[in-house]
Amino acid sequence: MSEAVVALLEVDNLKVNFHTPTGIVRAVRGLSFSLGRERLGIVGESGSGKSMTGRAILDLIPYPGEVLADRMLFRGEDLLTMPKATRRKLRGRRISMVMQDPKFSLNPVMTVGDQIAEAYRVHHKANAREARERTLAMLDAVQIREPERVYALYPHEVSGGMGQRVMIAMMLIAEPDILIADEPTSALDVTVQLQVLKILDDLVTSRGMGLIFISHDLHLVQSFCDRVIVMYGGKAMETMPAAELADPSAMSRRHPYTLGLLGCLPELGNPKGRLSTLTRDPEWLA
Amino acid sequence: MAEGESYGIVGESGSGKSTVLRVLAGLNQEWSGAVTIFRKAQPRVRDKAFHRAVQMVFQDPYGSLHPKKTLDDALAEPLAIHGIGDAERRIARALSDVGLPSAFRYRYPHQLSGGQRQRVAIARALVLEPTLFLLDEPTSALDVSIQAEVLNLLQALRQERKLTYILVSHDLAVVGHMCERLMVMQHGQCVEEMSAATLSARKPETAYAQALLVASEGFRRQG
Ligand SMILES: Nc1ncnc2c1ncn2[C@@H]1O[C@H](COP(=O)(O)OP(=O)(O)OP(=O)(O)O)[C@@H](O)[C@H]1O
Ligand SMILES: Nc1ncnc2c1ncn2[C@@H]1O[C@H](COP(=O)(O)OP(=O)(O)OP(=O)(O)O)[C@@H](O)[C@H]1O
Ligand SMILES: [Mg+2]
Ligand SMILES: [Mg+2]
């Protein structure tokens, strides 16, 4: 991980709060991490603040949410103090996010192809024909069969996994420095999933992109990522080399929450009557 | 499929898995062939009793929840449509079954995380106490601890109430855990049908099913 030395992103003590009529929801409670030219996994409990962390980096926390942090640096520049317009320009071009609900994030009344082409033209000088060709090439790169047919489909006409790949194509076409991918492959079959991960992997290795990979799939994170943050209740329980998730000799160092997660998995070839579940300890949030 | 059986569908993205479930649920009218459910050949348009007995949990939880309706509305609505009383108790029970705190009851979908929305979708299907459950990737948005809780719940319900499941999933370990038999789909067709034992022993016949098993072992970096 020697290339991780140049920090693309530094986040110090990030907090995301929602002020609701029934009280404050603390979605993220003091998260700190840095991202280099690497694949950084984030795993953890549903509702633990993974998506809100990604959105906070992009300044996309919806009302009535508030973002607080001691520091949030993109290549040394402070995201929190820069003019809003400068920050908006980074979004989509330098820092992109593949949202967890791809179909919800797409425009329902525009074909998926036109949406990708438009994303390309926002960031590059290109005429309509060039944008269309780039889009078809990108759809092909994310393993969409019959790109011409799919170009002309509306979001409700594509399958779950096709929608995810459309989102990935749209975010990658701008060639960002940082990609935040929120469950980007959860609706893909396992063979297509590996092909899509190969594309992301190449971008990290060859172009030095920084990737934040949010996922529930522990095997995938362990085999694909360099480091992993394990989140619970808006906090990082631990950060570790991803390979250690499968290393028996490292288990004595693991946080009990991480051990609990590993124990919940069904395994092929090792049938279990009931799956183990987690006993959550209030101490973890202390 | 026999009554009380649990059957899995796995396969290529875009191969028609969700489409098959929608046809079985009576939500897609454009099909040909024959569909027999509850020993009765099913017409294109199903009756109200059918729509109560057969519930589908959709792959895309956001799309299946109305953005302007609270969880309470989302769960009360199917009960009202089918004229079922005792809504209060049933809603509280369904929420606790899927592990959502009762404080969430008056939240809107956008105030929930992805996995919390998916649990609402499961709870909404559960309140009607269906006999045939069509589950489209029910746990792919859930972390593994909530997944384990939901799968345990589905197993327990199946034993208690003799429910029948069709489960679509990309996670072969989940299908192996939940189902007795499964079908592998590619290009809109079934390429192989096998028992869970064959899957666990990693002994499928077709090259495609074998490729799925290999890919499910994780990412491999070349060189
Ligand atoms: N508008 C809102 N008002 C109140 N609470 C909210 C709002 N939006 C999100 N939350 C809460 O913030 C917490 C963090 O949400 P987030 O979407 O980051 O979770 P997550 O870790 O991505 O979970 P999942 O794995 O289920 O997607 C959740 O408990 C959620 O209920
Ligand atoms: N309304 C529609 N108009 C045109 N094509 C459609 C429509 N609905 C589905 N399709 C096509 O039917 C095929 C099967 O889609 P389906 O959603 O059943 O796939 P799936 O196996 O569930 O895939 P995934 O695993 O990605 O969810 C896809 O190629 C899709 O583009
Ligand atoms: Mg999320
Ligand atoms: Mg589908």
Image (cartoon, coloured by chain):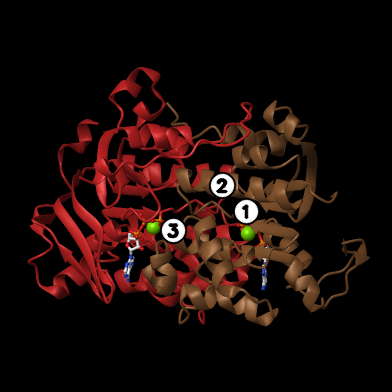
Chain colours: A red, B brown
In the picture, measured across the screen, residue A154 lies left or right of residue A8, that is: right
Q: Which mark is residue A168?
A: 3
**Local crowd at mark 2 within 10 Å, few (<14), some, or many (≥20)?**
many
Residue where numbered disc 2 is placed: A192
Nearest the viewer among A255 and A209 is A255
As helix, strand or loop, the secondary structure at mark 3 comes to helix
Q: Residue at x 58, y 61 (%)?
A: B122
Q: Estimate the spatial distance between the alpha carbons at disc 2 and disc 1, rounded to whole Å.
A: 8 Å
Tell me the kind of residue under disc 3: Ile
Q: Position of residue B163 (x, y in %)?
A: 74, 53
Q: Which mark is residue B64?
A: none
**Label 1 marks which chain's residue?**
B
Q: Tell me whether marks 2 and 1 sit on the same chain.
A: no
Does label 1 point to a residue whose CB lies under 8 Å from ligand 2?
Answer: yes
Residue B92 in sight here:
yes
Residue where numbered disc 1 is placed: B13
